[in-house]
Image (spheres, grey):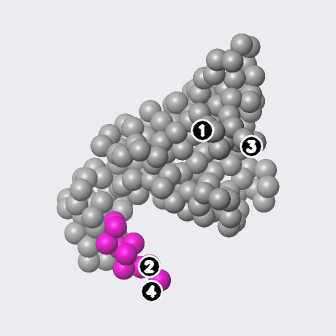
């Protein structure tokens, strides 16, 4: 059966690509592999839309702090299209314990990417309205200022997540990691 990706997820990926044009995309994904096909997964095109199966999940590589940004953005906005989000051993769901992050203990801890599934209703999965990521440069400027205030050098607070901001961000994570 032919398949396609939910339009709302393509809109999200486009916004992520605009906000972080130089991001790593190696852990990006939509359609499931053989392991996904062997179990229930939103990476499988199980939602039927005419002659097509629709994939209602996307993985976006956690590069340049993207996972943290998206996690916080989704928790704050609680977009009605979201079914659940998994990132960094945590899950938040619009259904179970609504919008309260809880531990995630699945076989993949989702530390290399953030996973987003949308509801299997056409009004959710094919809604192409903005996810609100177009203002990410302001968020990056805030992070750059916070990194500088904490003694890390992210370069200028210009809203661009470049190599200096990435290095400062990683250094701050390493410093705050438990011993």
Residue 36 in the figure: left or right of residue 9? right
Nearest to the eye among marks 3 and 2: give it.
Answer: 3
Q: Residue at x 45, y 53 (%)?
A: 62
Circle 3 — which element?
Answer: loop
Circle 2 — which element?
Answer: loop
Q: Residue at x 46, y 46 (%)?
A: 27
Does 163 appear in magenta? no
* Span colored in magenta: 169-178
Q: CA distance from mark 4 to mark 3?
A: 37 Å
Mark 2 vs 1: CB contact within 8 A: no
Mark 4 vs 3: CB contact within 8 A: no
Q: Residue at x 64, y 17 (%)?
A: 2
**x, y (%) of residue 150?**
31, 77
Farthest residue toward the left? 155
**Circle 3 residue:** 39
**Circle 4 residue:** 179
Does 175 appear in magenta? yes
Q: CA distance from mark 1 to mark 4?
A: 36 Å
Mark positioned earlier in the residue sequence (3 or 2): 3
Nearest to the eye among marks 1 and 4: give it.
Answer: 1
Q: Quadrant of residue 126?
A: top right
**x, y (%) of residue 108?**
60, 57
**x, y (%) of residue 129?**
56, 30
**x, y (%) of residue 155?**
20, 61
**Circle 2 residue:** 177
Circle 4 — which element?
Answer: loop
Nearest to the eye among marks 2 and 1: give it.
Answer: 1
**Circle 1 residue:** 33
């Amino acid at each position: 059966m032919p398949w396609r990706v939910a339009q709302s997820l393509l809109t999200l990926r486009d916004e992520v690509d605009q906000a972080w044009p130089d991001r790593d995309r190696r852990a990006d994904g939509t359609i499931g592999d053989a392991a996904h096909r062997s179990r229930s997964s939103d990476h499988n095109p199980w939602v039927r839309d005419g002659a097509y199966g629709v994939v209602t999940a996307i993985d976006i590589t956690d590069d340049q702090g993207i996972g943290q940004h998206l996690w916080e953005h989704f928790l704050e906005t609680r977009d009605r299209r979201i079914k659940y989000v998994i990132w960094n051993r945590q899950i938040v769901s619009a259904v179970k314990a609504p919008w309260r992050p809880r531990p995630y203990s699945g076989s993949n801890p989702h530390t290399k990417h953030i996973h987003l599934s949308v509801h299997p209703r056409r009004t959710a999965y094919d809604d192409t309205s903005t996810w609100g990521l177009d203002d990410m440069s302001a968020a990056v400027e805030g992070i750059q200022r916070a990194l500088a205030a904490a003694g890390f050098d992210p370069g200028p607070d210009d809203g661009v997540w470049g190599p200096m901001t990435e290095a400062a961000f990683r250094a701050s994570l390493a410093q705050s990691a438990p011993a």
